[in-house]
Image (cartoon, helix red, strand yellow):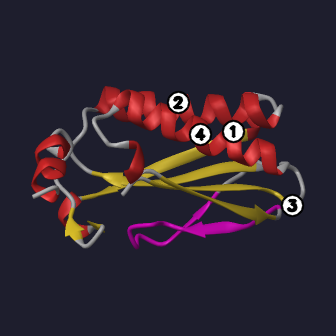
Amino acid sequence: MPFYRCLAPKDSLTYEQRERIAVAITDVHCGNSTAPRSFVQVAFMDSSPGDSVPDSHGSGQVRYGTPYFVAGGNRAGRSEETKANILEGILTRVSQIAGVPREMVSGFISEAPGSWTMEAGRILPDPGEEAEWCRQGTR
């Protein structure tokens, strides 16, 4: 379910940087949560100044004032500390890998219940219940 859209100016990131950012986002997300790595999805979108991006949970358009922006959508139910660690970790790693000052990267993470999302044809569990969910899927 974790779905991260990385917006960057056209031609500003090489394929290798995009690959490294996708791995870094997965590392940060999974290092701060109980989500399996296979849950994390990362997409890249070219952007232009003044662009906006739809909120992944339908609350309208999000405008951003930095050249690099990460719009995330996750399952609800994590602590405020965990959410802050995920967002800060992702934005820091994007800045490092893109080779731009941290001030040029912003983002947000919106949330929805796990029951609003399916993975491999199955409704997702709440955070912390992934191990049992995975065990049930192997029967």
CA gap between label 1 and label 3 equals 17 Å
71 or 1, which is in the foreground?
Answer: 1
Asked if disc 1 and disc 3 are in contact, CB closer than 8 Å, the reply is no
Say which residue appears at 16% left-offset and 55% top-offset: 138
- Is 66 placed above or below 97 here? below
Residue indicated by mark 4: 23
For label 4, the crowd category at 10 Å Cα-Cα, with few meaning under 14, some 14 to 19 and many 20 or more, is some
Q: Which residues are magenta?
A: 49-63
Say which residue appears at 82% left-offset and 61% top-offset: 49
Residue indicated by mark 3: 10
Residue indicated by mark 2: 88
Numbered circle sitting on residue 91: none
44 or 106, which is in the foreground?
Answer: 44
* Residue found farthest to the front: 139
Report the mark closest to the observer, 2 or 4. 4
- Is 42 placed above or below 37 here? below
